[in-house]
Amino acid sequence: MKAETPHSKQTEKNVALALSSGGARGLAHIGAIEELEARGYRIGSIAGCSMGALIGGVYAAGKLTEFREWMKTIDRKKMLELMDFSLSLNHLVKGNRIIEAIMEFVPDMAIEDLPIPYCAVAADLKAGKEVVFNKGSLFEAIRASISLPSFYAPVERDDMILIDGGVINPIPLNRAKRQAGDILVGIDVSGLDYQSQWEEERRLNARLKNDKSLKAKILDKLIPDNLDFNYLTVLSRTSSLMIRQNSILMAKLTNPDILVDIQMARYSTFDFDKSERIIAVGRQRTALAINKYEGL
């Protein structure tokens, strides 16, 4: 068999793209997409999980530029405004307000009507299995996929209880629709500095305690000031560790042509107000990965 040269690799420009979960770190997916396109790669399909499902869906709908501009308006105050807090025992935030805000400039549509093949991955708590959305409402699929356990409310649909797909398949490389001659590219932002995440979650709890509303007072009883370990931080840390290990395993099983593994030490799950800096990281790391693939 003739050995593959850097030049022959450069002729393979069609991409099946998989975007991982990762909270605010998933904004790096925007930079990754921009760099792929700038280098002449054509994204032929997208599979996403959690934040990857959101970014991928917005891109497939042709509204990534609008989404990026909207993200520039997000500060800490607006983040809290977008959190529709709940007193439920199984979640802190309902999760509807953020979807409604995005739908103001990204209209909902059927996944099968998108210009490129797209799917979002969620997990069914009742059946204990992966659920792949490749048809039906785009935003229903996104909302199910971003349902971070204990934080966002699960989505109940067709006798299923749907949560963040990251608990089963955080970087759905095996779900991206393939075409003859394409290359498989994965952008994995599931790795993070866990100490930074821990500190960020404590800061979020502190901000909530400054709220004098009745909901905040009840929340304060659930998450006391003198506890480093509470149900939210423990579940969040456990989920993060599990998601990271699953993403590593999926990469080994599928062996993508390009894997952009972005482990961020500076940015954590809730750093949505730092979008431009996170996007820049995604673009820079993707450029390095492409250079390696092309033999530059």
Image (spheres, rainbow, N blue to C red):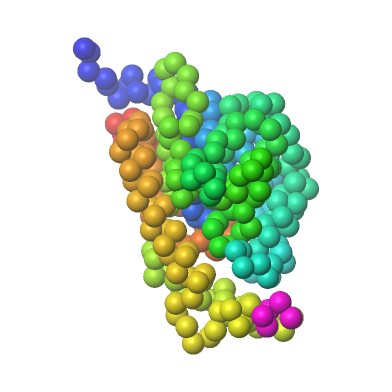
Residue 282 vs residue 175, the one in the foreground: 175
Q: Is residue 213 visible?
A: yes
Which quarter of the figure has residue 274?
Answer: bottom right
Horizontal side of residue 66 vs 249, given as left or right:
right
Residue 254 position, x and y percent, is 35, 33
Please say whether residue 279 is visible from this viewpoint: no
**Chief secondary structure of the magenta portion:** helix
Q: Is residue 47 above or below residue 28?
A: above
Q: Is residue 61 left or right of residue 184?
A: right
Which quadrant does the N terminus fall into? Answer: top left
Q: Which residue is drawn at the image coordinates 39% and 55% (left, top)?
A: 242
Is 43 above or below relative to 263? above
Q: Residue furthest right?
A: 104
Residue 10 rendering spot, x and y as whole percentages: 38, 24
Residue situated in front as seen by the camera: 205 or 35: 205
Range drawn in magenta: 214-218
Question: Which residue is pictured at 49% across the width and 42% down the height?
Answer: 129
